[in-house]
Image (cartoon, coloured by chain):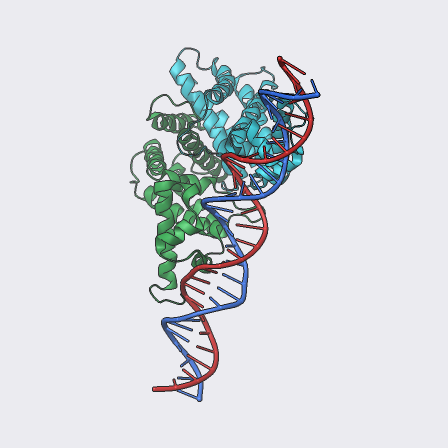
Chain colours: A green, B cyan, C blue, D red
Amino acid sequence: MARRSDHTREELYRMSLDAAREILRNQGLPALTARSLAARIGYSPGTLYNLFRNLDDLVVQLNGETLDALQAALDAVPDDGDTETRLWHLARAYIAFTVENRELWNVLFEHRLPEGEDVPDWYRGKLARLLARVEAALVPVIPDDVAARGRATRVLWAGLHGLCSLGQSGKLALVAEDGLDDLARDLIRTYLAGLPGH
Amino acid sequence: MARRSDHTREELYRMSLDAAREILRNQGLPALTARSLAARIGYSPGTLYNLFRNLDDLVVQLNGETLDALQAALDAVPDDGDTETRLWHLARAYIAFTVENRELWNVLFEHRLPEGEDVPDWYRGKLARLLARVEAALVPVIPDDVAARGRATRVLWAGLHGLCSLGQSGKLALVAEDGLDDLARDLIRTYLAGLPGH
DNA sequence: CCATTTAATGAACAATGTTCAATAAATAAT
DNA sequence: ATTATTTATTGAACATTGTTCATTAAATGG
Protein backbone atom coordinates (compact mmCIF):
# COMPACT_ATOMS: atom_id res chain seq x y z
CA MET A 1 0.00 0.00 0.00
CA ALA A 2 1.12 3.58 -0.28
CA ARG A 3 0.05 7.15 0.20
CA ARG A 4 -3.36 7.74 1.73
CA SER A 5 -5.16 10.90 2.60
CA ASP A 6 -7.31 9.70 5.44
CA HIS A 7 -5.69 12.12 7.85
CA THR A 8 -3.48 15.16 7.75
CA ARG A 9 -0.10 15.13 9.35
CA GLU A 10 -1.49 17.08 12.29
CA GLU A 11 -4.33 14.62 12.76
CA LEU A 12 -1.90 11.74 12.76
CA TYR A 13 0.24 13.50 15.34
CA ARG A 14 -2.83 14.01 17.52
CA MET A 15 -4.02 10.45 17.07
CA SER A 16 -0.60 9.10 17.97
CA LEU A 17 -0.32 11.02 21.23
CA ASP A 18 -3.90 10.18 22.16
CA ALA A 19 -3.34 6.52 21.43
CA ALA A 20 -0.11 6.56 23.42
CA ARG A 21 -1.94 8.09 26.37
CA GLU A 22 -4.62 5.44 26.15
CA ILE A 23 -2.11 2.60 26.05
CA LEU A 24 -0.29 4.03 29.05
CA ARG A 25 -3.54 4.36 30.96
CA ASN A 26 -4.70 0.82 30.30
CA GLN A 27 -1.56 -1.24 29.97
CA GLY A 28 1.37 0.72 31.32
CA LEU A 29 4.64 1.83 29.83
CA PRO A 30 5.99 -1.56 28.68
CA ALA A 31 2.97 -1.92 26.38
CA LEU A 32 3.78 1.32 24.62
CA THR A 33 5.57 -0.13 21.60
CA ALA A 34 5.87 1.19 18.09
CA ARG A 35 3.83 -1.68 16.75
CA SER A 36 1.01 -1.54 19.28
CA LEU A 37 0.80 2.20 18.85
CA ALA A 38 0.74 1.91 15.07
CA ALA A 39 -1.92 -0.78 15.19
CA ARG A 40 -4.08 1.42 17.39
CA ILE A 41 -4.08 4.32 14.97
CA GLY A 42 -4.50 2.02 11.97
CA TYR A 43 -1.16 2.74 10.39
CA SER A 44 2.14 0.91 10.10
CA PRO A 45 5.08 1.36 12.47
CA GLY A 46 7.07 3.18 9.83
CA THR A 47 4.51 5.97 9.72
CA LEU A 48 5.30 6.91 13.31
CA TYR A 49 8.84 7.73 12.27
CA ASN A 50 7.47 10.24 9.86
CA LEU A 51 5.90 12.09 12.78
CA PHE A 52 8.45 11.60 15.56
CA ARG A 53 12.21 11.26 15.55
CA ASN A 54 11.81 8.08 17.57
CA LEU A 55 9.78 6.70 20.47
CA ASP A 56 11.74 8.76 22.97
CA ASP A 57 10.74 11.88 21.13
CA LEU A 58 7.12 10.78 21.20
CA VAL A 59 7.31 10.32 24.96
CA VAL A 60 8.84 13.76 25.37
CA GLN A 61 5.99 15.29 23.37
CA LEU A 62 3.49 13.36 25.46
CA ASN A 63 5.18 14.58 28.63
CA GLY A 64 4.78 18.10 27.35
CA GLU A 65 1.05 17.62 27.15
CA THR A 66 1.03 16.00 30.57
CA LEU A 67 2.74 19.09 31.94
CA ASP A 68 0.04 21.19 30.32
CA ALA A 69 -2.66 19.07 31.90
CA LEU A 70 -0.98 19.37 35.28
CA GLN A 71 -0.76 23.12 34.83
CA ALA A 72 -4.46 23.22 34.00
CA ALA A 73 -5.24 21.20 37.11
CA LEU A 74 -3.31 23.65 39.27
CA ASP A 75 -4.80 26.65 37.49
CA ALA A 76 -8.24 25.33 38.33
CA VAL A 77 -7.76 25.72 42.07
CA PRO A 78 -9.11 28.99 43.46
CA ASP A 79 -6.75 31.67 44.70
CA ASP A 80 -8.41 32.49 47.98
CA GLY A 81 -7.67 31.97 51.63
CA ASP A 82 -4.39 32.46 53.40
CA THR A 83 -1.09 31.13 52.14
CA GLU A 84 -1.40 27.80 53.92
CA THR A 85 -4.79 26.95 52.50
CA ARG A 86 -3.78 28.12 49.06
CA LEU A 87 -0.71 25.91 49.11
CA TRP A 88 -2.74 23.08 50.53
CA HIS A 89 -5.29 23.33 47.74
CA LEU A 90 -2.49 23.28 45.20
CA ALA A 91 -0.94 20.26 46.85
CA ARG A 92 -4.28 18.46 46.95
CA ALA A 93 -4.81 19.13 43.26
CA TYR A 94 -1.31 17.88 42.53
CA ILE A 95 -1.82 14.69 44.50
CA ALA A 96 -5.18 14.11 42.85
CA PHE A 97 -3.55 14.49 39.47
CA THR A 98 -0.87 11.94 40.28
CA VAL A 99 -3.52 9.49 41.44
CA GLU A 100 -5.87 9.98 38.52
CA ASN A 101 -3.05 10.01 35.99
CA ARG A 102 -0.71 7.54 37.63
CA GLU A 103 1.01 6.25 34.53
CA LEU A 104 1.25 9.60 32.80
CA TRP A 105 2.82 11.14 35.87
CA ASN A 106 5.24 8.25 36.29
CA VAL A 107 6.38 8.58 32.71
CA LEU A 108 6.64 12.33 33.13
CA PHE A 109 9.20 12.10 35.89
CA GLU A 110 10.81 8.72 35.39
CA HIS A 111 11.45 8.82 31.71
CA ARG A 112 15.10 9.50 31.10
CA LEU A 113 16.44 10.67 27.81
CA PRO A 114 19.28 8.66 26.27
CA GLU A 115 22.76 9.68 27.43
CA GLY A 116 23.80 13.05 26.09
CA GLU A 117 20.74 15.04 25.19
CA ASP A 118 18.93 16.92 27.92
CA VAL A 119 15.41 18.23 28.38
CA PRO A 120 14.37 20.74 25.70
CA ASP A 121 13.88 24.41 26.52
CA TRP A 122 10.11 24.44 26.17
CA TYR A 123 10.11 21.62 28.70
CA ARG A 124 12.03 23.73 31.20
CA GLY A 125 9.63 26.55 30.48
CA LYS A 126 6.61 24.50 31.39
CA LEU A 127 8.29 23.36 34.58
CA ALA A 128 9.12 26.93 35.47
CA ARG A 129 5.51 27.94 34.94
CA LEU A 130 4.37 25.24 37.35
CA LEU A 131 6.83 26.44 39.96
CA ALA A 132 5.60 29.99 39.42
CA ARG A 133 2.14 28.92 40.50
CA VAL A 134 3.55 27.83 43.85
CA GLU A 135 5.83 30.79 44.19
CA ALA A 136 2.92 33.19 43.71
CA ALA A 137 1.24 31.73 46.74
CA LEU A 138 4.38 32.35 48.77
CA VAL A 139 4.63 36.06 48.01
CA PRO A 140 2.57 37.18 51.03
CA VAL A 141 4.81 35.31 53.47
CA ILE A 142 8.14 36.02 51.73
CA PRO A 143 7.49 39.38 50.05
CA ASP A 144 11.01 40.76 49.67
CA ASP A 145 13.77 38.16 49.61
CA VAL A 146 13.35 36.67 46.12
CA ALA A 147 16.18 34.20 46.62
CA ALA A 148 14.60 32.86 49.79
CA ARG A 149 11.23 32.65 48.06
CA GLY A 150 12.79 30.71 45.21
CA ARG A 151 14.30 28.28 47.68
CA ALA A 152 11.04 27.84 49.53
CA THR A 153 9.24 27.23 46.25
CA ARG A 154 11.65 24.51 45.20
CA VAL A 155 11.73 22.91 48.60
CA LEU A 156 7.95 22.62 48.76
CA TRP A 157 7.69 21.50 45.16
CA ALA A 158 10.37 18.86 45.51
CA GLY A 159 8.96 17.78 48.84
CA LEU A 160 5.55 17.22 47.35
CA HIS A 161 7.12 15.43 44.44
CA GLY A 162 9.06 13.16 46.75
CA LEU A 163 5.97 12.32 48.76
CA CYS A 164 3.99 11.40 45.66
CA SER A 165 6.88 9.53 44.11
CA LEU A 166 7.66 7.36 47.10
CA GLY A 167 4.02 7.10 48.03
CA GLN A 168 2.93 5.72 44.69
CA SER A 169 5.74 3.22 44.46
CA GLY A 170 5.00 1.90 47.92
CA LYS A 171 8.36 2.96 49.29
CA LEU A 172 7.20 5.22 52.07
CA ALA A 173 5.61 2.68 54.39
CA LEU A 174 2.40 4.67 54.38
CA VAL A 175 0.03 3.99 57.21
CA ALA A 176 -3.36 4.65 55.71
CA GLU A 177 -4.43 5.31 52.17
CA ASP A 178 -4.94 9.03 52.51
CA GLY A 179 -1.65 9.17 54.36
CA LEU A 180 -0.26 11.13 51.45
CA ASP A 181 -2.64 14.00 52.06
CA ASP A 182 -1.72 14.08 55.71
CA LEU A 183 2.00 14.17 54.98
CA ALA A 184 1.63 16.89 52.37
CA ARG A 185 -0.38 18.96 54.78
CA ASP A 186 2.20 18.39 57.48
CA LEU A 187 4.97 19.51 55.13
CA ILE A 188 3.20 22.70 54.16
CA ARG A 189 2.00 23.65 57.60
CA THR A 190 5.22 22.94 59.42
CA TYR A 191 7.45 24.45 56.76
CA LEU A 192 5.40 27.63 56.64
CA ALA A 193 5.40 27.84 60.42
CA GLY A 194 9.17 27.65 60.37
CA LEU A 195 9.71 30.54 57.97
CA PRO A 196 11.42 33.60 59.49
CA GLY A 197 8.88 35.99 60.91
CA HIS A 198 6.39 33.40 62.14
CA MET B 1 30.94 -26.79 26.49
CA ALA B 2 29.45 -27.94 29.76
CA ARG B 3 29.95 -28.06 33.48
CA ARG B 4 32.93 -26.20 34.88
CA SER B 5 34.11 -25.71 38.39
CA ASP B 6 35.85 -22.40 38.09
CA HIS B 7 33.50 -20.78 40.60
CA THR B 8 30.97 -21.80 43.17
CA ARG B 9 27.38 -20.74 42.88
CA GLU B 10 27.97 -18.07 45.52
CA GLU B 11 30.97 -16.72 43.67
CA LEU B 12 29.00 -16.51 40.46
CA TYR B 13 26.23 -14.65 42.28
CA ARG B 14 28.77 -12.20 43.66
CA MET B 15 30.48 -11.77 40.31
CA SER B 16 27.18 -11.12 38.58
CA LEU B 17 26.10 -8.37 40.97
CA ASP B 18 29.55 -6.79 40.92
CA ALA B 19 29.61 -6.86 37.13
CA ALA B 20 26.11 -5.39 36.99
CA ARG B 21 27.21 -2.58 39.27
CA GLU B 22 30.22 -1.90 37.11
CA ILE B 23 28.16 -1.80 33.93
CA LEU B 24 25.68 0.58 35.54
CA ARG B 25 28.48 2.84 36.72
CA ASN B 26 30.21 3.03 33.37
CA GLN B 27 27.49 2.67 30.79
CA GLY B 28 24.14 3.17 32.45
CA LEU B 29 21.03 1.07 32.74
CA PRO B 30 20.37 0.44 29.02
CA ALA B 31 23.75 -1.30 28.77
CA LEU B 32 22.82 -3.76 31.48
CA THR B 33 21.77 -6.66 29.25
CA ALA B 34 21.90 -10.37 29.89
CA ARG B 35 24.50 -10.84 27.20
CA SER B 36 26.81 -7.98 28.22
CA LEU B 37 26.61 -9.11 31.82
CA ALA B 38 27.33 -12.71 30.90
CA ALA B 39 30.27 -11.69 28.75
CA ARG B 40 31.70 -9.68 31.61
CA ILE B 41 31.75 -12.60 34.01
CA GLY B 42 32.98 -14.98 31.33
CA TYR B 43 29.87 -17.14 31.19
CA SER B 44 26.96 -17.53 28.83
CA PRO B 45 23.61 -15.75 29.20
CA GLY B 46 21.88 -18.97 30.18
CA THR B 47 24.03 -19.24 33.29
CA LEU B 48 22.52 -16.05 34.70
CA TYR B 49 19.13 -17.73 34.73
CA ASN B 50 20.56 -20.37 36.97
CA LEU B 51 21.32 -17.68 39.55
CA PHE B 52 18.43 -15.25 39.14
CA ARG B 53 14.79 -15.72 38.18
CA ASN B 54 15.27 -13.08 35.51
CA LEU B 55 16.93 -9.71 35.01
CA ASP B 56 14.31 -7.95 37.12
CA ASP B 57 15.20 -10.22 39.99
CA LEU B 58 18.86 -9.41 39.51
CA VAL B 59 18.11 -5.70 39.69
CA VAL B 60 16.08 -6.20 42.86
CA GLN B 61 18.99 -8.03 44.46
CA LEU B 62 21.32 -5.28 43.36
CA ASN B 63 19.00 -2.69 44.81
CA GLY B 64 19.12 -4.57 48.08
CA GLU B 65 22.86 -4.14 48.18
CA THR B 66 22.52 -0.50 47.21
CA LEU B 67 20.21 -0.01 50.17
CA ASP B 68 22.84 -1.62 52.38
CA ALA B 69 25.50 0.70 51.03
CA LEU B 70 23.24 3.69 51.62
CA GLN B 71 22.60 2.49 55.15
CA ALA B 72 26.33 2.17 55.71
CA ALA B 73 26.84 5.70 54.41
CA LEU B 74 24.27 7.04 56.85
CA ASP B 75 25.61 4.94 59.70
CA ALA B 76 29.02 6.48 59.13
CA VAL B 77 27.87 9.98 60.08
CA PRO B 78 28.49 10.85 63.71
CA ASP B 79 25.61 11.19 66.13
CA ASP B 80 26.57 14.41 67.78
CA GLY B 81 25.36 17.96 67.81
CA ASP B 82 21.79 19.15 68.05
CA THR B 83 18.95 17.73 65.98
CA GLU B 84 19.40 20.16 63.14
CA THR B 85 23.08 19.44 62.61
CA ARG B 86 22.50 15.69 62.97
CA LEU B 87 19.80 15.78 60.32
CA TRP B 88 21.94 18.00 58.17
CA HIS B 89 24.84 15.59 58.34
CA LEU B 90 22.53 12.75 57.39
CA ALA B 91 21.17 14.74 54.49
CA ARG B 92 24.63 15.65 53.31
CA ALA B 93 25.68 12.02 53.40
CA TYR B 94 22.54 11.07 51.49
CA ILE B 95 23.15 13.69 48.82
CA ALA B 96 26.79 12.66 48.52
CA PHE B 97 25.70 9.07 48.04
CA THR B 98 23.29 10.00 45.26
CA VAL B 99 26.01 11.97 43.52
CA GLU B 100 28.74 9.35 43.86
CA ASN B 101 26.40 6.51 42.99
CA ARG B 102 24.18 8.25 40.51
CA GLU B 103 23.19 5.26 38.42
CA LEU B 104 22.79 2.90 41.35
CA TRP B 105 20.54 5.35 43.12
CA ASN B 106 18.50 6.00 40.00
CA VAL B 107 17.92 2.30 39.49
CA LEU B 108 17.11 1.92 43.16
CA PHE B 109 14.18 4.29 43.00
CA GLU B 110 13.17 4.26 39.38
CA HIS B 111 13.15 0.57 38.72
CA ARG B 112 9.58 -0.67 38.68
CA LEU B 113 8.66 -4.30 39.02
CA PRO B 114 6.41 -5.77 36.33
CA GLU B 115 2.70 -5.32 36.95
CA GLY B 116 1.45 -7.45 39.79
CA GLU B 117 4.31 -8.28 42.11
CA ASP B 118 5.34 -5.74 44.69
CA VAL B 119 8.54 -5.08 46.63
CA PRO B 120 9.67 -8.03 48.78
CA ASP B 121 9.51 -7.86 52.55
CA TRP B 122 13.25 -7.71 53.15
CA TYR B 123 13.21 -4.69 50.85
CA ARG B 124 10.65 -2.93 52.99
CA GLY B 125 12.72 -3.86 56.04
CA LYS B 126 15.79 -2.14 54.68
CA LEU B 127 13.75 0.94 53.85
CA ALA B 128 12.32 1.01 57.33
CA ARG B 129 15.80 0.79 58.82
CA LEU B 130 16.87 3.81 56.81
CA LEU B 131 13.87 5.76 58.01
CA ALA B 132 14.68 4.71 61.56
CA ARG B 133 18.03 6.45 61.30
CA VAL B 134 16.24 9.72 60.57
CA GLU B 135 13.56 9.14 63.15
CA ALA B 136 16.15 8.60 65.87
CA ALA B 137 17.49 12.06 65.25
CA LEU B 138 14.01 13.48 65.70
CA VAL B 139 13.37 11.98 69.13
CA PRO B 140 14.74 14.96 71.07
CA VAL B 141 12.39 17.41 69.33
CA ILE B 142 9.35 15.11 69.17
CA PRO B 143 9.79 12.91 72.22
CA ASP B 144 6.23 11.78 72.92
CA ASP B 145 3.92 11.85 69.91
CA VAL B 146 5.09 8.82 67.94
CA ALA B 147 2.58 9.42 65.17
CA ALA B 148 3.79 12.96 64.68
CA ARG B 149 7.39 11.79 64.73
CA GLY B 150 6.61 9.20 62.10
CA ARG B 151 5.05 11.87 59.93
CA ALA B 152 7.99 14.21 60.35
CA THR B 153 10.37 11.39 59.48
CA ARG B 154 8.56 10.58 56.27
CA VAL B 155 8.15 14.20 55.28
CA LEU B 156 11.85 14.93 55.67
CA TRP B 157 12.84 11.68 53.99
CA ALA B 158 10.53 12.18 51.06
CA GLY B 159 11.50 15.82 50.83
CA LEU B 160 15.15 14.94 50.57
CA HIS B 161 14.33 12.25 48.06
CA GLY B 162 12.37 14.69 45.95
CA LEU B 163 15.18 17.21 46.00
CA CYS B 164 17.74 14.66 44.88
CA SER B 165 15.43 13.13 42.33
CA LEU B 166 14.47 16.37 40.62
CA GLY B 167 17.91 17.80 41.12
CA GLN B 168 19.73 14.98 39.38
CA SER B 169 17.34 14.86 36.44
CA GLY B 170 17.68 18.61 35.90
CA LYS B 171 14.03 19.25 36.61
CA LEU B 172 14.38 21.67 39.48
CA ALA B 173 15.89 24.64 37.68
CA LEU B 174 18.75 24.68 40.15
CA VAL B 175 20.67 27.90 40.36
CA ALA B 176 24.14 26.81 41.33
CA GLU B 177 25.77 23.42 41.53
CA ASP B 178 25.67 23.07 45.28
CA GLY B 179 22.09 24.33 45.16
CA LEU B 180 20.97 20.93 46.33
CA ASP B 181 22.81 21.26 49.61
CA ASP B 182 21.30 24.69 50.17
CA LEU B 183 17.79 23.45 49.54
CA ALA B 184 18.19 20.42 51.78
CA ARG B 185 19.50 22.64 54.54
CA ASP B 186 16.59 25.00 54.03
CA LEU B 187 14.13 22.12 54.24
CA ILE B 188 15.58 20.78 57.49
CA ARG B 189 16.07 24.11 59.21
CA THR B 190 12.70 25.57 58.30
CA TYR B 191 10.75 22.39 58.93
CA LEU B 192 12.36 21.92 62.33
CA ALA B 193 11.70 25.54 63.20
CA GLY B 194 8.05 25.01 62.38
CA LEU B 195 7.52 22.05 64.69
CA PRO B 196 5.18 22.69 67.65
CA GLY B 197 7.12 23.93 70.65
CA HIS B 198 9.71 25.97 68.77
C1' DC C 1 35.14 -48.07 36.07
C1' DC C 2 30.45 -47.16 35.34
C1' DA C 3 26.10 -44.50 36.59
C1' DT C 4 24.08 -40.48 37.97
C1' DT C 5 23.68 -35.97 38.87
C1' DT C 6 24.22 -31.27 37.49
C1' DA C 7 26.30 -26.96 35.72
C1' DA C 8 27.00 -24.66 31.46
C1' DT C 9 26.03 -23.90 26.90
C1' DG C 10 24.35 -21.78 22.71
C1' DA C 11 20.93 -22.29 19.36
C1' DA C 12 16.17 -20.96 19.03
C1' DC C 13 11.94 -17.95 19.68
C1' DA C 14 9.26 -14.08 20.08
C1' DA C 15 9.32 -9.26 20.43
C1' DT C 16 11.69 -4.85 20.38
C1' DG C 17 13.24 -0.08 17.88
C1' DT C 18 14.53 1.63 13.62
C1' DT C 19 15.67 2.02 8.62
C1' DC C 20 14.66 2.28 3.85
C1' DA C 21 13.78 0.70 -0.99
C1' DA C 22 9.48 0.01 -3.18
C1' DT C 23 5.04 1.69 -4.28
C1' DA C 24 1.01 4.06 -5.39
C1' DA C 25 -1.77 7.97 -4.38
C1' DA C 26 -1.94 12.95 -4.71
C1' DT C 27 -0.42 16.94 -6.95
C1' DA C 28 1.79 19.74 -10.60
C1' DA C 29 3.02 20.45 -15.27
C1' DT C 30 2.23 20.17 -19.95
C1' DA D 1 -6.28 14.64 -20.53
C1' DT D 2 -1.96 12.92 -20.10
C1' DT D 3 2.28 12.87 -18.20
C1' DA D 4 5.68 13.89 -14.72
C1' DT D 5 6.89 14.75 -10.06
C1' DT D 6 6.43 14.74 -5.45
C1' DT D 7 5.43 12.42 -1.20
C1' DA D 8 2.99 9.57 2.30
C1' DT D 9 2.80 4.78 3.52
C1' DT D 10 4.22 0.44 3.69
C1' DG D 11 6.26 -3.88 5.24
C1' DA D 12 10.17 -6.54 4.86
C1' DA D 13 14.71 -6.46 6.87
C1' DC D 14 18.34 -5.89 10.58
C1' DA D 15 20.30 -5.84 14.88
C1' DT D 16 19.27 -6.61 19.79
C1' DT D 17 16.59 -7.78 23.47
C1' DG D 18 14.90 -11.37 27.44
C1' DT D 19 14.13 -16.04 28.13
C1' DT D 20 13.82 -21.13 27.49
C1' DC D 21 15.61 -25.70 27.07
C1' DA D 22 17.53 -29.87 24.82
C1' DT D 23 22.27 -31.09 24.56
C1' DT D 24 26.65 -31.89 26.52
C1' DA D 25 30.37 -32.94 29.37
C1' DA D 26 32.38 -32.35 33.76
C1' DA D 27 31.92 -33.58 38.60
C1' DT D 28 30.27 -36.81 41.89
C1' DG D 29 28.77 -41.34 43.93
C1' DG D 30 28.57 -46.24 43.95
Report if residue A110 is visible in the image.
yes
Q: Count the marks.
A: 0
Left or right of residue B22, residue C30 in this image: left
Residues A145 and B54: in front is B54
Name the one closer to the observer, D3 or B188. Answer: D3
Above or below, B170 against A186 in this view is below
Residue D3, how many percent across, how many down?
Answer: 44, 85
Which quadrant holds residue B147?
top left
> In the rendered image, which quarter contains the N terminus of chain A?
bottom left
Residue at screen point 50% across, 15% down: B136
Q: Is residue A178 above or below residue D12?
A: above
Establish if A83 lies above or below B74: below
Horizontal relation, residue D15 to residue B198: left or right: right
Q: Quadrant of the C terminus of chain A?
A: top left
Q: Position of residue B127 (x, y in %)?
A: 49, 22
Asked if one can make out residue B100 in the rendered structure from this viewpoint, the answer is: no
- In percent of width and height, residue D17 lies at 54, 42
